[in-house]
Every structure is written in C-alpha cells, then in structure tokens.
Image (cartoon, grey):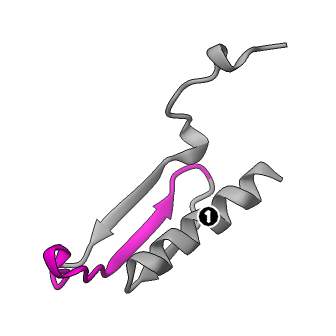
Amino acid sequence: MGTARDQPSLPTQRAFVVQLHSESQLAKGQFKGRVEHIVSGQSAHFSSMKALKAFMQRVLVEAES
C-alpha cells in the first residue's frame, strides 16, 4: 500500500482549466467565465467566485466517492 509521500502534490484528478471572460474585472471581484474539470470533462459557466468554487467542490466530491 502506498503512503501519502507516494501521492503527487498536484494530482491530475484535481486539475481544472479556468477561462476568464474578457468582461471579468478581478480587481472589483467580478469573475465570469468557464471552468472544465480535466479528468471528467465536466464543465460549467460561472458568473461569480462563489459559483466557480461550488462547481469545483461538487466535481471533487463526486470524484472522491
């Protein structure tokens, strides 16, 4: 059985691509764009940091179960 030391610190199961829309204004906290989970291919559009984080959390919980 492997140890935590054998696990990569940046596992591919936790990899996402986040593409920010040109209208996003990060300095003002305005996030708008698209996110895709690399391994599963699931994707979503988001219009807030809260929505982005919710998508990532949902996908990661699904992947761990």
Question: Tag 1, which secondary structure?
Answer: helix
Q: Is residue 50 left or right of residue 61?
A: left
Measuring from the top left, give residue 18's x and y in whole percent: 36, 63
Q: Amino acid at mark 1?
A: Gln
Q: Is 23 placed above or below 6 here?
A: below
What residue is drawn where x is 29% and y is 79%?
A: 31
**Residue 50 in magenta stretch:** no
What residue is drawn where x is 23% and y is 78%?
A: 21
Within 10 Å of the Cα at label 1, are there few (<14), some (14-19), or many (20+) other Cα atoms?
Answer: few
Residue linked to disc 1: 57
**Residue 35 in magenta stretch:** yes
What residue is drawn where x is 17% and y is 85%?
A: 23
Q: Is residue 61 left or right of residue 16?
A: right
Q: Is residue 29 left or right of residue 5?
A: left
Question: Which range is magenta?
Answer: 22-39
Measuring from the top left, give residue 60's x and y in whole percent: 66, 56
Q: Is residue 51 left or right of residue 23?
A: right
Q: Is 31 placed above or below 1 here?
A: below
- Residue 47 is drawn in which quadrant? bottom left
What residue is drawn where x is 73% and y is 53%?
A: 63
Q: Which image quarter holds the N terminus? A: top right
